[in-house]
Image: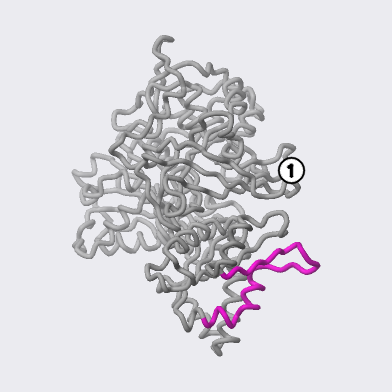
């Protein structure tokens, strides 16, 4: 345990987060608020925004990190991760640091909180002194990660305040007292307004498009690829990226920055009594606070609400906590305080998470409070709209200067009267390139799947539903290079309704470039899925795998499908390869380790 000494007079705390969906960032900001109440000088930063060379000078650090995919670090901590695991770092690098690691994960995935555990261990190896064991927050818990986070934070503050006592004469600021906002809004005179359209700046010619400088790509076509009578609307959308400098290969991902629809923006402004055409500049309340990188300045209220504030996300506990401070109505305030208390989490879950209630709908339910929200708190109250990732469904060799994606428009019912809609897919589906110039901000990212460099290596692709998207890119790319060993297992409900790209596949089969196995689950009495087709074609698969060194790829929805496919593959290995159950399992694991079995699934 560090010794309180002369250095300790500077009560400074650094909170670093690695966040994919925003939960870890939300938790990091919560710890930041709790630190301010305890009179710490506190910085909250994404791991990749922080200058890692300074880490050796930090005395007190809390790391908050999520785990993504198959045990990978979130995008905004990848550079930090690579640095931390460099072999040449001396084992005493961080010996002056007291630290704690809070992990956020989901125990239904095999590598539960893998990144937090590994980070905790690595900082320890480098000489760091852990204040507490690593916290393993779990999405699967009835009360969500807070079931672990709440008691862990109480213990953390006990440890920290023992090391860094409150300065004489100061008390912990009560939770009833509202902290100042991160930014203040400075309204500008009317004549400094500029039209909203100029806010999507063209990418500077020198820079490759990125999250901070997306490319405003022209939408070329937006075509429905399911029958009108089919319950699901799926689109094949094409963008023109000529002149952007974007290049990609099969398996890569396009990131799209969505926006709120005009009706929601108008409702939000009415509820909060905001003038959408007002123009403002943001100024940080405290000198060290960085301005939001994704928000152009000066900015109109309409631009802020349309492009930045995620008013359609399901609000988190921190939203209700801050909202309770603005409430002038006793009934509303009591309910908001209940939602933000540890005891009220089950109630909050059934109000918000289970029915997928949006932030905008929650604001409707608290009208007195909502009309009293000071505009400068909007950026503390509502998170920013996060970009959405789509597998690229085309190859540059076949469609130069173009990107195509396959988008299932998210729409489902809960107990709320209005159907739930996915922000990005609904927005994309609403755009009609035939009615004028339609632009969508996007950039490209390396994907998790890598296809074999050797043209003679066969590939077995298992892609039910929109999971087929990356395989369309791979097949186009491989066929353009004259590669024939392409084997695709595709599944959907009905051949006549949601057999995406049917004509394209059938033409490739005729030309001898593709082996195609289809499972139409609802076209006969008993349901047939891709795993059934895998078992039926076991001999071919064993020959491709064992005789020809094929690679296997799996893409699609992560509910039951990945486990069912793995089971089917194991049964093929037993029946055709004569392996025992444990040998079959080990064979698949070895394929995964050598990157010959890769999967990309999402929930």
The residue closer to the viewer here, 339 or 109, is 109
- Asked whether residue 539 is drawn in magenta, I would say yes
Above or below — where is 251 with respect to 225?
Answer: below
**In the image, is 46 to the left or to the right of 54?**
right
Badge 1: residue crowd in 10 Å (few <14, some 14–19, many ≥20): few
User: Can you give x and y, in whole percent of width and height, for residue 395 in the image?
Assistant: 45, 54
Identify the residue at the far right of this view.
Answer: 525
The residue closer to the viewer here, 205 or 82, is 205
Q: Is residue 404 visible in the rendered structure shown here?
A: yes
Name the residue located 48 percent from the left edge and 63 percent from the top edge: 112
Name the residue located 59 percent from the left edge and 25 percent from the top edge: 268
Identify the residue at the far bottom of this view.
Answer: 578
**Quadrant showing the C terminus:** bottom right
User: Can you give x and y, in whole percent of width and height, for residue 234 in the image?
Assistant: 63, 48
The residue closer to the viewer here, 574 or 55, is 574
Above or below — where is 557 with respect to 4?
Answer: below
- Asked whether residue 151 is drawn in magenta, I would say no
State the residue position of label 1: 415
Magenta highlight range: 515-543
Identify the residue at the far front of this view.
Answer: 511
The quadrant in which residue 50 appears is top left
Name the residue located 46 percent from the left edge and 80 percent from the top edge: 548
Q: Is residue 314 visible in the rendered structure shown here?
A: no
Colour style of the rendered protein structure: one colour
Name the residue located 49 percent from the left edge and 31 percent from the top edge: 307
User: Can you give x and y, in whole percent of width and height, for residue 513 in the image?
Assistant: 52, 68
The residue closer to the viewer here, 483 or 462, is 483
């Amino acid at each position: 345990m560090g010794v309180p000494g002369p250095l300790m007079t500077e009560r400074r705390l650094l909170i670093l987060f690695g966040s994919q969906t925003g939960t870890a960032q939300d938790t990091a900001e919560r710890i930041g608020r709790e630190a301010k109440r305890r009179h710490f000088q506190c910085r909250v930063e994404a791991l990749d925004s922080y200058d890692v060379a300074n880490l050796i000078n930090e005395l007190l650090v809390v790391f908050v990190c999520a785990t993504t995919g198959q045990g990978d670090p979130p995008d905004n901590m990848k550079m930090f991760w690579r640095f931390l695991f460099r072999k040449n770092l001396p084992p005493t690098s961080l010996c002056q640091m007291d630290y704690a690691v809070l992990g956020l994960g989901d125990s239904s995935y095999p590598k539960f909180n893998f990144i937090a555990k590994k980070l905790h261990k690595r900082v320890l190896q480098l000489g760091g002194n852990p204040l507490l064991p690593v916290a393993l927050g779990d999405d699967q818990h009835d009360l969500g990660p807070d079931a672990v986070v709440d008691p862990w934070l109480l213990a953390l503050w006990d440890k920290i305040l023992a090391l860094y006592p409150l300065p004489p004469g100061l008390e912990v600021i009560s939770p009833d007292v509202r902290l100042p906002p991160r930014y203040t809004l400075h309204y500008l005179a009317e004549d400094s307004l500029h039209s909203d359209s100029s806010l999507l700046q063209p990418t500077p010619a020198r820079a490759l498009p990125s999250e901070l400088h997306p490319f405003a790509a022209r939408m070329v076509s937006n075509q429905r690829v399911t029958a009108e009578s089919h319950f699901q609307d799926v689109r094949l959308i094409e963008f023109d990226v000529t002149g952007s400098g974007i290049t990609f290969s099969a398996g890569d991902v396009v990131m799209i920055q969505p926006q709120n629809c005009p009706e929601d923006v108008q409702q939000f402004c009415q509820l909060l009594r905001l003038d959408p055409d007002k123009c403002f500049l943001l100024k940080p309340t405290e000198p060290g606070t960085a301005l939001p990188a994704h928000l152009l300045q000066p900015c109109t209220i309409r631009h802020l609400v349309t492009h930045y504030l995620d008013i359609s996300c399901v609000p988190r506990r921190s939203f209700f906590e801050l909202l309770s401070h603005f409430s002038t109505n006793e009934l509303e305030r009591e309910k908001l305080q209940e939602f933000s208390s540890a005891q009220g989490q089950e109630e909050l879950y059934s109000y918000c998470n289970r029915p997928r209630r949006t932030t905008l709908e929650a604001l409707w339910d608290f009208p007195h409070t909502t009309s009293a929200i000071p505009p400068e708190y909007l950026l503390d109250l509502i998170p920013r709209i996060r970009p959405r990732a789509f597998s690229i469904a085309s190859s540059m060799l076949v469609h130069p200067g173009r990107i195509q994606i396959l988008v299932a428009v998210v729409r489902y019912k809960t107990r709320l009267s209005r159907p739930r809609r996915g922000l990005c897919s609904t927005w994309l589906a609403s755009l009609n390139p035939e009615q004028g110039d339609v632009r969508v901000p996007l950039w490209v990212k390396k994907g998790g799947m890598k296809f074999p460099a050797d043209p003679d290596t066969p590939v077995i692709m298992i892609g039910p539903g929109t999971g087929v998207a990356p395989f369309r890119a791979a097949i186009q790319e491989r066929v353009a290079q004259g590669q024939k060993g392409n084997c695709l297992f595709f599944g959907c409900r009905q051949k006549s309704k949601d057999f995406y790209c049917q004509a394209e596949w059938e033409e490739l089969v005729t030309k001898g470039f593709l082996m195609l196995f289809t499972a139409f689950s609802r076209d006969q009495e008993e349901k047939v899925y891709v795993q059934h087709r895998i078992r039926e074609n076991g001999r071919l698969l064993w020959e491709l795998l064992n005789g020809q060194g094929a690679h296997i790829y799996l893409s699609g929805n992560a509910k039951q499908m990945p486990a069912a496919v793995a089971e089917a593959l194991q049964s093929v290995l037993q029946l055709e390869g004569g392996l025992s159950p444990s040998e079959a399992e080990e064979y698949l694991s070895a394929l995964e380790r050598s990157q010959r079995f890769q999967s990309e699934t999402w929930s």
